[in-house]
Image (tube, coloured by chain):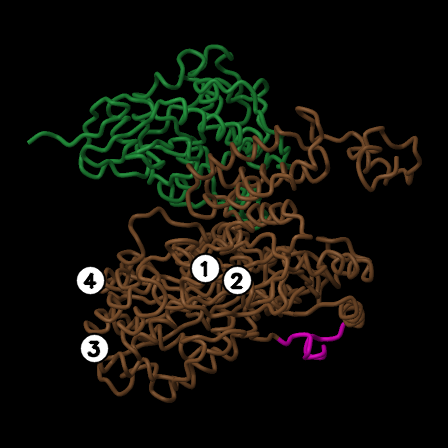
Amino acid sequence: MSEEGFDAGRLDELLRPVVDRHGGEPGQLVQILREAQGVVGYLPAAALTAIARALGLPRAQVEGVAGFYSFFHLTPPGRYRVLFSDNITDRMLGSGELLDRLCNKLWVERGKVSEDGLVSVDTTSCTGMCDQGPALLVNGQALTRLSGERVERIGELIRAQAPLADWPAEYFRVDDNIRRRDTLLSAEWPAGAALRAAIARGGEAMLAEMKLSNLRGRGGAGFTTAIKWESARRAECHAEADGRPAARYVVCNADEGEPGTFKDRVLLASYADLVFDGMSVAALTIGARQGLLYLRGEYAYLLPALRENLERRRRSGLLGRAVCGQAGLDFEIDIHVGAGAYVCGEETALLESLEGKRGIPRIRPPFPVTAGYRGQPTVVNNVETLCKAALIALRGGAWFAGLGTKQSTGTKLLSISGDVETPGIYEYPFGVSVNQVLQDCGAGNAQAVQVSGPSGICLAMHEFSRSIAFEDVPTAGAFMVFGTHRDMFEVARNFAHFFRHESCGFCTPCRVGTSLVANCMDKIAKGLGTQYEINQVFKIHRLLHAASHCGLGQAACNPLFDTLQKFRPAYERRLCSLDFEPAFDLDQALAAARQMTGRDDPAAHFGLAARLPGVTP
Amino acid sequence: MTQPSILLDGQPVPFADGQTIMDAAMAADIFIPHLCHHPEFKPQGSCKLCTVKASGRYVSACTMPARDGMEVENNSPDLNDKRRTLLQMLFVEGNHFCPSCEKSGNCMLQALAYELEMLSPHFDQFYPNRPVDASHPEVLLDFNRCILCELCVRASRDVDGKSVFSLSGRGIDKHLIVNAESGRLADSDFSWADKAAHVCPVGVILRKREGFAVPIGKRRYDVEPIGMQVERLAARSAGEAYEDCGEG
């Protein structure tokens, strides 16, 4: 092994099987980079050159894609890469202190690789373990329920260079925590039952049942599923320039990145057959022969079980050629794994990523139903939506429409976390009141609920009588509860940093605006904020709403706007009384000089430091 | 049959099938501020300077197809205020120091800042660390001024067929890269004859050993504000080498 952690002479030998496994297909670039990193350890410049050459792509394009995703490393990242989940719920459970503790133990600075190349410790966006946090990823593997004691032990294991396989299996345990079951979570149908029911109905009749059900998308936007399916079914498909035959595609969006959401993880872990049945039903209805499941990188630990499930379905004739013995009914499912980019949950960014590109949302129209994956008619549905479609195939659209409310039919899975006694998955018919949910999960002293994650809405106590439904409070599933002892300013600041980290950077307002807003929040947190910063946040909010390219930018200031409206004292008690205070801090600027000269005496400080909490002048 | 038209700030502007709001406006000699748009390349709508209000919704004029009877608001205090803020964002995101820049007077970013009466960068500067690339014998790359419009990316890929440039990184860390393992322009097949060498609207791609041939004060946008030069902006075309800075 060379110092960089890979053997440069063996690079081609290492990469060839990876490229071959994907047939040298440029569209598989993200998967190839992921697997290449798996065998090499990271993605050195020479590896990018070799991959570009093998795929016939410009090298800069390959580097551009590799540079986009958080989980790809272009420099050696440490043999143990520890990433603490940085959602507000993890922080509320003490992740910040645990991170510091691990850094101290390992003598490593946060965000930097230790000098011996052994370890790096940093944060990552919500890993979807909010009901069993604090959580972290080590070399991509999810760890849950961290405690001081566990962190100490993890430090020892890393120092001893113990392979992950030798770590206590208990550390990697992920629970379902299903707390309330309704029609979906109590379903006990055998694999393929929904598919057979749909075959018996036929494509046209299945579509009619979908229309009758009035099922709306569970990923947040709430678009009527039957309209998507019908548009894709009617849309023209065409042979591609490279000779690929005309085709339609079904894509399952399992890029569950919205902080505070983890319902799709549970569905994929324990209801995978229902998910695959739902994809198969969609395929039958729109006339697709290929399905793609886009699994977020954080959930890669589910991959072996999901692949095994697909293999089982192939063996029992539920997948492959002549599905269920129906001549001409062919359907295959492929799993793509993401690499750490929240924006890929946006359906057109997801399609770009599936095609091996940077996850930049496309200009719409055209919409995916007419020009989606590889320009072909494509249905992109959320994991939960597809499960519901499977139930509709089994029990009919009228039955489904009888659940929930008129405009929001069926049930909804909520991922509940934060200050509650029993965090986990709760399934309710649409129309349930926030109060009811809070009562069921044991949220005694809630002052606020962030519904549908940072891009959703923050409800204050006086709004708890509102109901979860598209016509009142729509949600993709996240339900984060904040007790009266929580600081809502810090909640909003956490979300502001999340959006800065996850902005794709395509358009000016979101790329720069999310940074400006995060800086404003940091300035207020330091005690240097004034009314001026509050006005800035409002101004940038209006601009992002109006001019951003996609929903991420449009929603990026929502949590700040909501908390400023509803929890203003949390901001105001931090403001200094001045009209304006510069962010530049002379004392802070001299920190590097103090470090270099080894001085920390009073004469090495400036007066401003005296005013700041926690700094001794 | 009458030609379809949009109502741009109350004025009827005809358009042909397939044209965007930007196309229609340019053809009618009406200025809509823009940076990443260039008539010879596929519009991408990333700078958002051309944000207009069409039928009550904010959209990018360069990507929004014109529709008959569409009411479009363009030159209004609300939109110009938003555009000014976008310019300020671009100014603080990079390192833009006009007085010493060879492109001063020929720079679209600077010209738009004057046009939209931007008096200061307003926000705190980010001061990113962006080393220059002086490796190439003919050309200097000063990334400090890059506004990520992707015009050089598109020109090199779509016209030159070389893909010399690409974008890497994400969010605020997004940056321009060069197609070479070393990352140096000298190790790519870039040449001054490339289309990509002549499309930068700011001062990233500069010819070496040639500076200030036209004195500041007599350059393109010194002479006439950018808002009055729609005809020239619309005439930029793929075939001819873009008449470069200095001669204007």
Tell me, yes or no, whether dots 3 and 1 are on the same chain: yes
Tell me, yes or no, whether dots 2 and 1 are on the same chain: yes
Using the image, name the chain to which the residue with label 4 belongs.
Answer: A
Q: With respect to residue A120, does B225 lie above or below?
A: above
- Kindly check if marks 2 and 1 are in contact, taking CB atoms under 8 A apart as contact: yes
Choose between B103 and A252: the one closer to the eye: A252
Give the left or right position of residue A110, taking residue A381 as reference: right
Chain coloured brown in the rendered structure: A
Q: Quadrant of the N terminus of chain B?
A: top left
Choose between A210 and B136: the one closer to the eye: A210
* The color chain B is rendered in: green
Q: Which residue is mark 1?
A: A476
Is residue B212 visible to us here? yes
The amino acid pointed to by label 4 is Arg
Is residue A46 visible to us here? no
Find the magenta span and give its range: A161-173
Q: Residues within 10 Å of mark 1 (few under 14, many from 20)?
A: many
Give the Cα separation between the discs numbered 4 and 1: 28 Å
Using the image, name the chain to which the residue with label 3 belongs.
Answer: A
Which secondary structure lies at badge 2?
loop
Give the Cα separation between the discs numbered 3 and 2: 34 Å
Residue that appears at 35% across and 31% down: B52
The amino acid pointed to by label 3 is Gly
Locate residue A446: give its quadrant: bottom right
Q: Residues within 10 Å of mark 4 (few under 14, many from 20)?
A: few
Q: Which residue is mark 4?
A: A234
For marks 4 and 2, the one nearer the N-term is: 4
**Is A308 within the magenta?**
no
For marks 3 and 2, the one nearer the N-term is: 3
Q: Which mark is residue A261?
A: 2
Using the image, name the chain to which the residue with label 2 belongs.
Answer: A
The amino acid pointed to by label 1 is Ala
